[in-house]
């Protein structure tokens, strides 16, 4: 489905409470914008899985795997009935290529710094 200019329209995805949206370690094929509901971000550690954050309406998640083509750093699980707009990898990449080069470089740097911090914390 596309708009009058031929650009793909975002798709909507609906998730039931406790439904896994993606798992830590998965390849990233899309990012998400929460329209309605609540998403929990969960991370595995030596004690199992712990809640590290919540994504509310108007917030974006799942973008890091699209920025740097690395596996998902954490799992995303619907905490309640949730509706998200999805942004497919090819659409995201196209927008990144058209973005201001400085902003694109900053996003890549921020993503790299977050992953490096996670590696350090895991070794600590």
Image (cartoon, rainbow, N blue to C red):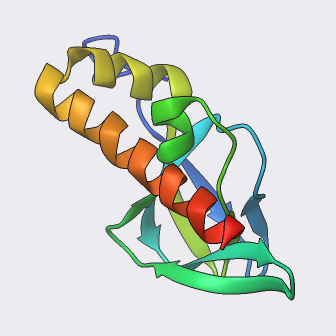
Residue visible at 24% across and 29% down?
104
In the rendered view, tell whether residue 77 sits above or below residue 25: below
Left/right placement of residue 119 relative to residue 105 reads right
Q: Nearer the viewer, residue 71 or 82?
A: 71
Which corner quadrant holds the C terminus? bottom right
Horizontal side of residue 28 vs 19, given as left or right:
left
Q: Classify residue 96 as left or right of residue 93.
A: left
Q: Where is residue 110 in the image (x, y as percent from the top left)?
A: 33, 48
Is 19 above or below relative to 53?
Answer: above
Query: Which of the 4 image quarters holds residue 100?
Result: top left
The residue at 69%/66% (across/down) is: 123
- Residue 4 seen by the camera: yes
Residue 53: % across, % down: 52, 81
Quarter of the figure with residue 40: bottom right
Q: Residue at x 32, y 68 (%)?
A: 58
Frontmost residue, 124 versus 84: 124
Asked if residue 13 is positioned above or below residue 123 in the image, the reply reads above
Question: Looking at this rendering, what residue extends furthest in the front direction?
Answer: 124
Find residue 98 and report its horizontal and vertical position in percent.
Answer: 22, 16
Report the label total.
0
Front-most of residues 75 and 114: 114
Q: What residue sits 58% from the left and 73% below the top?
A: 82
Q: Position of residue 18 (x, y in %)?
A: 78, 81
Whether residue 88 is visible here, answered yes or no, is: no
């Amino acid at each position: 489905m596309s708009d009058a200019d031929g650009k793909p329209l975002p798709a909507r995805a609906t998730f039931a409470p406790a439904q896994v949206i993606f798992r830590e370690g998965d390849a990233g094929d899309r990012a998400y914008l929460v329209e309605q509901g609540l998403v929990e971000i969960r991370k595995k550690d030596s004690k199992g899985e712990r809640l590290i954050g919540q994504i509310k309406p108007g917030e974006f998640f799942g973008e890091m795997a699209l920025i740097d083509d690395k596996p998902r750093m954490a799992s995303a699980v619907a905490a309640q009935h949730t509706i998200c707009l999805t942004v497919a990898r090819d659409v995201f990449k196209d927008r990144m290529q058209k973005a201001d080069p400085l902003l694109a470089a900053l996003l890549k740097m921020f993503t790299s710094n977050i992953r490096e911090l996670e590696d350090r914390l895991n070794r600590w």
